[in-house]
Image: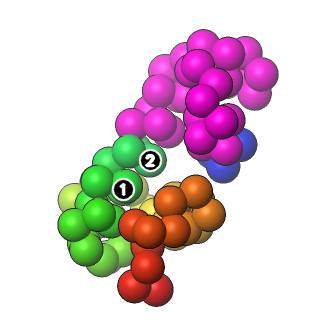
Amino acid sequence: TAIVIELYEQKIEPPEIAARVKHSQEAVDRYIKDYERIKFLARRGIGEDEMALMTGRGKTVIRQYMRLLKKHHPEIVKRE
C-alpha cells in the first residue's frame, strides 16, 4: 500500500502505478481513494479511532496512511 501512495504523491498516474507494482487497477484505485478519505478526515481533526469506524479500515492501515500524510502533508498532521 505504501509504495502505491508514494508513487501517487509523485504524481504518477494510477494505471502506471498498477503496472509498476503489479497490482490490479481496482486495488490501486481503492488505496488512493482510502488515502484521500483519510486525508479529508485528518484535515477536519478526526482521530484515528473515529477514522477507522467511519472508513471501515483497520487501525494499522489508518496509521500507515497517517505516516504517509505526515511525510507528504505535514501541515495536515501537525497535532501529533
Instruction: Say which residue appears at 29% left-offset and 54% top-offset.
Output: 40
Work out whether residue 4 can be spotted: no
In what quadrant of the picture does the N terminus appear?
Answer: top right
The colour scheme is: rainbow
Membership of 46 in magenta stretch = no
Q: Nearer the viewer, residue 30 or 56?
A: 30
**Residue 26 badge:** none
Whether residue 79 appears in this view of the structure is: yes
Q: CA distance from mark 1 to mark 2?
A: 5 Å
> Residue 61 at x, y = what percent?
51, 60
Residue 21 % position (x, y)? 75, 27
Helix, strand or loop under label 1: helix
Label count reads 2
Q: Which residues are magenta?
A: 5-33
> Residue 25's image quarter?
top right
Q: Residue at x 40, y 85 (%)?
A: 79
Give the crowd class for mark 1: few <14, some 14-19, many >=20 residues within 10 Å: many
Q: Is residue 78 left or right of residue 47?
A: right
Q: Is residue 15 left or right of residue 35?
A: right
Left or right of 76? Residue 72 is right
Residue at numbered disc 1: 38
The amino acid marked with disc number 2 is: Tyr
Residue lying furthest front in this view? Answer: 75
User: Could you say where residue 15 lies in the image, as x and y percent from the top left?
Assistant: 60, 13
Q: Secondary structure at mark 2?
A: helix
Where 45 sits versus 20, above or below? below
User: Who's the residue at 58% across and 57% down the image?
Assistant: 72
Dot 1 amino acid type: Ile
Predominant SS along the magenta part? helix
As drawn, the label of residue 35 is 2
Check if mark 1's residue and mark 2's residue have beta carbons within 8 Å.
yes
Task: Decide: is 47 above or below 20.
Answer: below
